[in-house]
Image (cartoon, rainbow, N blue to C red):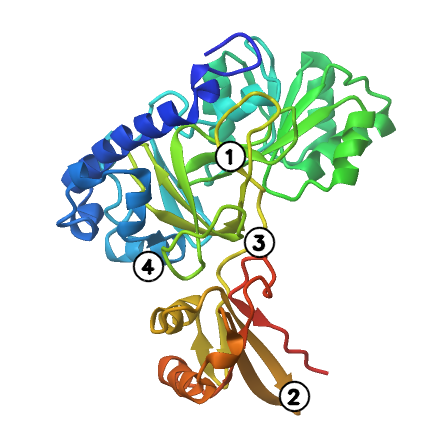
Amino acid sequence: MGNGAYYDDLETRDMESRRAAQLAALREQIAHARARAPYFAKTLKGIDAEAIASLEDLAKLPVTRKADLADRQKEDSPLGGLNATPIADLAHIFMSPGPIFEPDTMRPDYWRFARSLWAAGARPGDIVHNTFSYHMTPAGMLVESAARAIGCPVFPAGVGNTDLQVEALQRIGARFYAGTPSFLKIILDRAGELGADIGTLTHALVGGEALPPSLRQEFAERGVSVLQNYGTADLGLIAYESEAREGMIIDEGVIVEIVRPGTGDPVAEGEVGEVVVTTLNPDYPLIRFATGDLSAIMPGQSPCGRTNLRLRGWMGRADQSAKVKGMFVHPRLVAEFLARHDGLGKARLVIDNQDNRDSMVLRCEAENPDTWDIDALRSDLQAVFKLRGEVEIVAPGTLPNDGKVIDDIRRYE
């Protein structure tokens, strides 16, 4: 851990060194997961870790979807066989909505959140007022383990009891807040109503909700510098803001891909797609874990001096299933259709309703739109989706760059 702007030297290493280190760690993680986690022993069977020649080879490995995790954990309780550390050696098992169960161990900063706390201004000796929940979910412990790794004592506030929280802030003099932005506003507003001086609180790391620019500006005007991060209970920290406030810098402990929703196929830099993460956590070695979140890689490096890739932040959900004429359509069906036709690029299934009748049109980008056999494509669409629909071929760059594969625009009046 550093004592300046950066948490450690990993944040400023050149990309070639980072990629070489990540490749070596990836090979080790694949071999470790196959040997220790029953689920990955099956899904990675036949995969030679040493044959992974580059990070791009990740795309050859199967994707594990968060959306499927609850069912897997019912079949193989409690963690679906994805854990490489035996249940008896875990420190906690938490539960998130789904329900999905997540492990942690006594390894310091298990979720690697310390890096984001440091970037947001936490320093050794700062008291952290932690309002994330400690009840069942791991949110409170994510922050606590990170704060302890830095050397920050923690006030485990949780949520609610606003007056008591204001009193604690006033008397203890916490410098750093962790929690949702909405609850920070509630605390600041209540302190104002009570005439309580909580001016020691100058920095915050928020998550779990959107942070509108207007609210961030309001916090700044009230003397609190607020940054945000992006993580999950399964993976820990994925990316975090720095003082530059230009995108979110990817954490050093994960490898992030952006793929076309419903597939495991990486998209071009800058294109919106689903966030797929491989974590280097030895206890819970999630490999190509599809989060269901949308984002995109930003070009260039952060002005703050950190050199890792940046995400544009959370941009919505990739789980875009819909029901048409009583049947479900999924992004994977769009991917299956595209795989049958060389030359088709990005696609978007538009679902509408006219005169109380559902209709769907699959719009696909391709060169020379007028040369495609629409009748044949329409027939193939029906074969894949088991539903009738239209197909339109449009020029490359026509479809919006928003990650949507299924766009349900139906309105019922």
Mark 2 vs mark 4, CA separation in Å: 36 Å
Whether 132 is drawn above or below 121: the answer is below
Question: Is residue 362 in sight in this rendering?
Answer: no
Mark 2 or mark 1: name the one nearer the start of the chain: 1
Snapshot quadrant of residue 92:
top left
The residue to which callout 1 is attached is: 239
Mark 3 or mark 2: name the one nearer the start of the chain: 3
* Closer to us: 380 or 138: 380
Residue under the image location 37 percent in, 46 percent down: 101
Residue 71, labelled with which disc?
4
Q: Indicate the position of residue 169 as horizontal and vertical percent values.
A: 70, 19
Residue under the image location 59 percent in, 32 percent down: 158
Q: Which part of the image, by quadrant, shows the N terminus? A: top left
Residue under the image location 23 percent in, 38 percent down: 53
Mark 1 or mark 4: name the one nearer the start of the chain: 4
Whether 317 is drawn above or below 247: the answer is below
Mark 2 or mark 4: name the one nearer the start of the chain: 4
